[in-house]
Image (cartoon, rainbow, N blue to C red):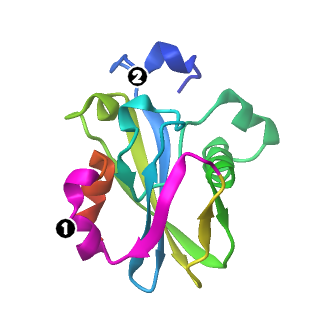
Amino acid sequence: MSYRPRPEVEEDPSYKQLIPYCIFRHDGKIFHYTRGSQQGEKRLHAKRSIGIGGHISAEDQQSGNCVYHEAMWREIKEEVFLETEFTQSCVALINDDETEVGKVHLGIVHIFDLEEPKVRPREESIVQVGFEKPEQLNAQRDQFETWSQICFEFL
């Protein structure tokens, strides 16, 4: 494992960047949103998603805690307000070499089972949010990024 400048590895499939991919679920319904144009990964603009998360950075190691968990919580806190109690499980890896984004990222999927459906955007790049049953979201799967489509198979 090493830290490299993001521009150096975003197009280089010889490096896989770990990405926490957090899915929020309440009463069988999944939190979803559309990525706005201000979101960092330009290849995903205007795509719908069910995952919150992002890149691990060298700054995440400064706390002395687990770097991966520090990065996951930093990303969650940057992107949404999570205003309810929950239980969390790490459930899967996504290694998708079929897309340009997938070739340089490895998704680590976490499911957050929420006591209440209280997730709201903190970033302006997260728009058109809501909670829906996975079957309803899967019926519109062509609007979603690849990782969300992969996760639909198991939700």
Give 19 or 83, whichever is nearer the viewer: 83
Looking at the image, tell me whether mark 1 or mark 2 is earlier in sequence order.
2
Magenta span contains residue 88: no
Residue at image x 62%, y 47%?
A: 75
**Which corner quadrant holds the C terminus?**
bottom left
Give the side of residue 108 with respect to residue 120, left or right.
left
Position in image of residue 74 (x %, y %) = 68, 48
Q: Which amino acid does label 2 sit on?
A: Tyr
Question: Magenta residues, as a range?
Answer: 123-143
Give 66 or 138, whichever is nearer the viewer: 138
Position in image of residue 24 (x %, y %) = 49, 68
Circle 2 packing at 10 Å, graded few (<14), some (14-19), many (20+), is some
Q: What residue type is labelled 1?
A: Ala
Position in image of residue 81 (x %, y %) = 67, 63
Residue at image x 43%, y 30%?
A: 42
* Residue 103, placed above or below residue 143: above
Location of residue 44 (image quadrant) = top left
Q: Is residue 23 visible?
A: no
Q: Distance between the residues labelled 1 and 2?
A: 33 Å
Residue occupied by mark 1: 139
Q: Can residue 92 be seen in this view?
A: yes
Circle 2 SS class:
loop
Location of residue 139 (image quadrant) = bottom left
Circle 1 packing at 10 Å, graded few (<14), some (14-19), many (20+), is few
Circle 1 SS class:
loop
Residue occupied by mark 2: 15
Give 93 or 50, whichever is nearer the viewer: 50
Disc nearest the viewer among 1 and 2: 1
Q: Are marks 1 and 2 in contact (CB under 8 Å)?
A: no
Give 71 or 83, whichever is nearer the viewer: 83
